[in-house]
Image (cartoon, grey):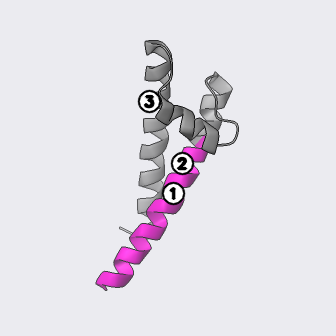
Amino acid sequence: MTPFEIGIIVGMIWSFALVVWTLTEITSGEPSPWLMLVAYIYEGFNFTPAGILKGAGWAFADGFISGYIISMLIQWVIY
């Protein structure tokens, strides 16, 4: 797999995980401190539908960049 494909996969997984985590925390009561930290880091992410979509966008970008860079470094070291 290319670093671009790995970045897409990691971004999709982190975005999906953040949405599921947020919806679970909202329905179970008060959000955890870790989710509040993510809401502090990602601009516009809050516990409304629009805020969750903004957070998913930030999570995708964060996951894509992280996955891309890490896979590039791993491929550079291995090959």
Please tell me which of labels 1 and 3 falls first in the chain.
3
Q: Do the residues bearing badges 1 and 3 touch, measured as CB atoms within 8 Å?
A: no
Q: Residues within 10 Å of mark 3 (few under 14, many from 20)?
A: some
- Can residue 50 be seen by looking at this rendering? yes
Q: What stretch of residues is rendered in magenta?
A: 57-79
At 48% from the left and 51% from the top, the residue drawn is 11
At 43% from the left and 74% from the top, the residue drawn is 72
At 53% from the left and 61% from the top, the residue drawn is 65
Circle 2 — which element? helix
* Depth check, front residue: 34 or 23: 34
Question: Which amino acid type corresponds to the residue marked 1 in the rendered image?
Answer: Phe
**CA gap, disc 1 to disc 3?**
19 Å
Percent coordinates x, y for residue 60 in the rendering: 54, 48
- Whether residue 5 is situated above or below residue 18 in the rendered picture: below
Please tell me which of labels 2 and 3 falls first in the chain.
3
In the picture of the structure, the residue carrying the numbered disc 1 is: 64
The mark found on residue 21 in the picture is 3
Q: Is residue 78 magenta?
A: yes
Q: Do the residues bearing badges 1 and 2 touch, measured as CB atoms within 8 Å?
A: yes
The mark found on residue 60 in the picture is 2
